[in-house]
């Protein structure tokens, strides 16, 4: 059964990572940048988006990444800064949305056709999507959170913020290997899960 649980986690991981990167490419394409589409990254094929190290980190540590979708903000129609903010927010945003939908689906499974395998699969889908969203929302380059923060800051701070980007990867490595990321991510994930579960319970109380 333990092996079965591990195997169930694989599709949940692939879905969470794939939908995250697809969302980046989709929003960029909608804003006028076809780079991801031209490079074959505007797809739901998980093999195109996988980064082996990021996948292993998400599996074992609870946070990880896929291969970043290429984006060229110079192709955006309208404000480039705000466009990049929208592209960056799309990945974590769709992960949180998928986690909430999965929670509702889990409720239906519990209520109408209980199945251990489906419960485990949907539960893993909820967990990995929440963890992936929180990790990427950290305001540390090159994570999505840093691009969202850059989009919110006034233009006069752009130069100073770009100077900090070179230290981002080193800070990420430090936080990962000291365990600090886990101390941040797991409590936040618990709060978000509790919040979503509360809303989904209200949903069932009204409509079921």
Image (spheres, rainbow, N blue to C red):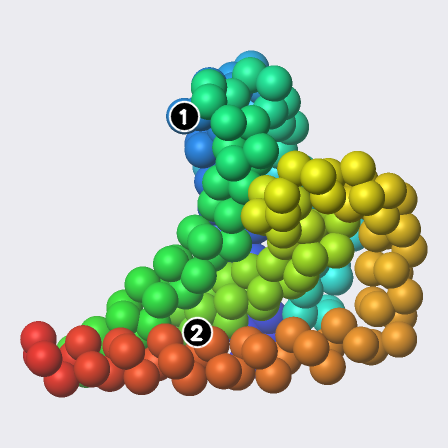
Bin the neighbour count of mark 1 within 10 Å (Cα to Cα): few under 14, some 14-19, many 20 and up: few
Bin the neighbour count of mark 2 within 10 Å (Cα to Cα): few under 14, some 14-19, many 20 and up: some
Residue 81 visible (yes or no): yes
Image quadrant in which you'd find residue 170: bottom right
Q: How many marks?
A: 2
**Frontmost residue, 182 versus 47:** 182
Q: Which is nearer the N-term, disc 2 or disc 1?
A: 1
SS under mark 2? helix
Name the spot of residue 35 as percent of width and height, x first: 58, 19
Residue 28 lies left or right of residue 115; in this view the side is right
**Frontmost residue, 89 versus 44:** 89
Where is mark 2, residue-wise? 123
Residue occupying the point 55% across, 76% down:
189
Where is mark 1, residue-wise? 30
Q: CA distance from mark 2 to mark 1?
A: 31 Å
Q: Is residue 91 above or below residue 79?
A: below
**Frontmost residue, 46 versus 91:** 91
Residue occupying the point 73% across, 81% down:
183
Residue 94 lies left or right of residue 65; in this view the side is left
Name the spot of residue 140 as percent of width and height, x first: 75, 55
Q: Quadrant of the N terminus?
A: bottom right
Residue 204 lies left or right of residue 41; in this view the side is left
Name the spot of residue 172 as percent of width and height, x first: 83, 59
Q: Which mark is nearer the camera, 2 or 1?
A: 1
SS under mark 1? helix
Residue occupying the point 79% across, 37% down:
159
Image quadrant in which you'd find residue 135: bottom right
């Amino acid at each position: 059964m333990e092996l079965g649980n591990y195997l169930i986690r694989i599709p949940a991981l692939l879905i969470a990572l794939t939908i995250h990167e697809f969302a980046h490419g989709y929003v960029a394409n909608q804003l006028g940048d076809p780079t991801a589409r031209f490079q074959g990254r505007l797809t739901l094929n998980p093999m195109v988006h996988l980064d082996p190290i990021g996948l292993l980190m998400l599996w074992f540590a609870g946070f990880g990444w896929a291969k970043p979708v290429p984006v060229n903000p110079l192709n955006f129609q309208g404000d480039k800064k705000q466009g990049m903010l929208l592209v960056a927010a799309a990945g974590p945003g769709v992960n949180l949305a998928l986690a909430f939908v999965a929670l509702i689906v889990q409720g239906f499974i519990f209520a109408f056709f209980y199945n251990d395998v489906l419960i485990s699969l949907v539960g893993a889908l909820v967990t990995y999507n929440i963890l992936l969203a929180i990790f990427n929302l950290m305001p540390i380059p090159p994570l999505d959170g840093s691009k969202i923060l850059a989009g919110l800051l006034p233009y006069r701070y752009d130069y100073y913020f770009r100077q900090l980007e070179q230290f981002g990867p080193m800070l990420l490595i430090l936080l990962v290997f000291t365990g600090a990321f886990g101390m941040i991510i797991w409590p936040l994930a618990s709060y978000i899960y509790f919040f979503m579960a509360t809303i989904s319970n209200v949903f069932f109380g009204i409509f079921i």
